[in-house]
Image: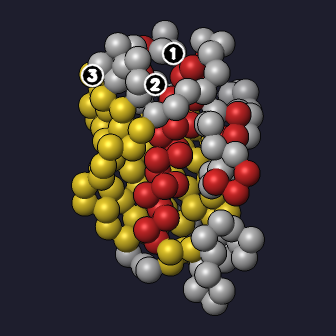
Amino acid sequence: MQTPLPPAGEFVRHSGTMLLIERLAEASDTHAVCEVSITENSTFYRDGRGVPAYVGLEYMAQTIAAYDGAQRHRSGEPPEIGFLLGTRRYEASRSHFAAGETLHVRVDMTFNDNGMAAFDGVITVAGETRARASINVYRPGGGVNLAEVAR
């Protein structure tokens, strides 16, 4: 049986209303999955519409941060800052994420070298893909290979 993971806030440097992810559901050497519940109290929520789908890019970025934070957590280190460098092919099937939906945000590492990394991200709701993108990130002091932090 896998040990339950702490709340997502223990793995990222975001706090308050800018911590958009709620729970780190999975973390491995190559991927992470976080959950986000959309409510009328969600940051960026628009009455009658929900959270704009473009916020999904930040959900993915924070899931990448949680991935890195989980790797650091395993070796007793605190979360560190990272930078979103850019994204390619962000596609969303709807304009908003609706109240009552639980988003499953998954990121899979596709490249990693000297602090530069790339991830493929996908957001699903009840198994249906709602958004996807490729994301490039950088972690200062990047001589450390993100995938090797857990070893």
Q: In percent of the image, x 56 and y 37: which residue is there?
A: 66
Colour setting:
secondary structure
Q: Position of residue 55 (x, y in %)?
A: 49, 64
For this view, does 9 lie left or right of residue 53?
A: right
SS class, disc 2 = loop
Circle 2: residue type: Asp
SS class, disc 3 = strand
Badges 3 and 1: C-beta atoms under 8 Å apart? no
Q: Earlier in the sequence, mark 3 or mark 1?
A: 3
Above or below for 36 versus 151? below
Q: Position of residue 53 (x, y in %)?
A: 46, 71
Q: In percent of the image, x 30 and y 49: which residue is there?
A: 86
Q: Nearer the viewer, mark 2 or mark 3?
A: 3
Gap between marks 2 and 1, in whole Å? 7 Å
Which residue matches tag 3? 113
Badges 2 and 1: C-beta atoms under 8 Å apart? yes
Point out which mark residue 29 bears. 2
Q: In percent of the image, x 43 and y 68: which residue is there?
A: 54
Q: In percent of the image, x 72 and y 76: which residue is there?
A: 40
Circle 1: residue type: Ala
Can residue 90 be seen in the rendering of this structure? yes
Can residue 32 be seen in the rendering of this structure? no
Q: Earlier in the sequence, mark 2 or mark 1?
A: 2
Badge 1 crowding class, 10 Å Cα cut-off, few under 14, some 14 to 19, many 20 or more, is some
Observer-nearest residue: 109 or 114? 114
SS class, disc 1 = loop
Which residue matches tag 1? 150
Q: Nearer the viewer, mark 3 or mark 1?
A: 3
Q: Position of residue 140 (x, y in %)?
A: 41, 24
Q: Earlier in the sequence, mark 2 or mark 3?
A: 2
Gap between marks 3 and 1, in whole Å? 16 Å
